[in-house]
Image (cartoon, grey):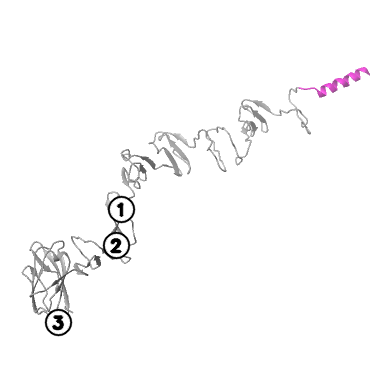
Amino acid sequence: MKSIAMGITLWASLLYAQTVINGDRTLKGSWDASGAASTRPVKTGTATPATCASGEIFFNTNAPAGQNLYLCQPDNTWTQLSATASTAARTDQSNTYAANTVQTFQGTIDASGAGVSLPAKSGTKAAMPSTCTQGAFYFATDAEANRKIYTCSSTNTWTQVAYTQGTIAAKPSTCGVGQIYFATDAVAGRNLYLCATANIWSQTGALVGGTPAANQMAFWSDANTIASDDKVTRDASGNLTASGNITAGSVVGGNTLNAGAYTLFGRYFWTNAGASLTCASGAVSFNAANMASSLHVDLNNQATCAITWDNSPATRQVAWVVICNGATTPTTTLTWPANVRGGMAAGGTAGQCAGQAFMYDEVASRWQATGPGSSWN
């Protein structure tokens, strides 16, 4: 009886003591460790074993905290478990991902507090990958300053970022089409240079001066400035009006140009206002002084009127002459000097006028009528 009691006591002590199990064991049913002081259910180590059977778990003590567990699936293949889903917030992480693996991030990556951020693959231009996915970046360490970034603009196509800056003198001697250069010492508003043709820079922009108003024309006041011109305006119909003098080597066309006191019709000057001369004692003289504008001649009821016209055309070589009969008596004889060719004859009735255009021929030193003159009316 005594031996039976001792056996029961020994069995009880073994049941509640710490036990080391050697060899293989197969457990069936439930294993409840909820009351244990601690549990260490998986094998641990500094590196995953070379072989494993599907379903094994391994705790790698050298892995980043929260990513220590590895699962074996299939045989001899370990897969690391991540502590959190990729969409969950992660802060203060220092992770190194294996080469040739793809990591996909969702949401926002905030690197504003990072000590250093290296978001792009780097290397020499020669080492740039031959293939790329649209949106990828590459940092070319041997590219020119401020142009080291390349973007994958389309699949397998790298495009160098265009922008760079410096002084005008430091502008690169060569450039690729589409490249942009910002000259820090250029005239404000004209800092940008575009490479429209290989190795040729074109400066863009211009300063706008003055106070532009509706219908005003513009002109280059210097090499860098476009200014508004309050002397010339253009209406919605395309008619130009100028308050100053107009100088032209050749005037062609039938449109109307208003230039101060003059309106240009084709090749002829018509006057809206000009010098007024009077035929006195049967004579009237045109000279350089009164040729500064078109002429209105009042025949002053003279029966005859002899005209003299000097060969000093002053500021213009085209003239429009309007001759008007006196209010009571028309002039019957109008005499032109030898240096005038094609002058119109007198005619009409009292108070009526006629006009004629003349051009000065410098070679022949004479005034030549450009047409027969308008009819007396």
Determine the secondary structure under disc 3: loop
Start and end of the magenta stretch?
Answer: 1-19
Q: Is residue 292 visible?
A: yes
Q: Please give the residue where the numbered disc 3 appears in the rendered image.
A: 328
Label 3 or label 2, whichever lies nearer to me, is 3
Q: Is residue 114 left or right of residue 217?
A: right
Residue at the spot 85% in from the left edge and 20% down from the top edge: 10
Q: Position of residue 155 (x, y in %)?
A: 46, 44
Furthest residue to the front?
281
Find residue 258 and report its horizontal and vertical position in percent. 25, 66
The quarter in which the C terminus is drawn is bottom left
Whether residue 335 appears in this view of the structure is: no
Residue 41: x and y in percent read 71, 29
Helix, strand, or loop for circle 1?
strand
Q: Amino acid at mark 2?
A: Thr
* View extreme (top): residue: 2
Going by the numbered disc 3, the residue's amino acid type is: Thr
Residue beneath the point at 25% across and 63% down: 243
Residue highlighted by disc 1: 226
Whether the residues at callouts 1 and 3 have beta carbons within 8 Å, the answer is no
Taking the image as shown, residue 201 lies to the left or right of residue 267, namely right
Q: Amino acid at mark 1?
A: Ile
State the mark number for residue 325: none
Whole-number angstrom distance, CA of label 3 to CA of label 2: 42 Å
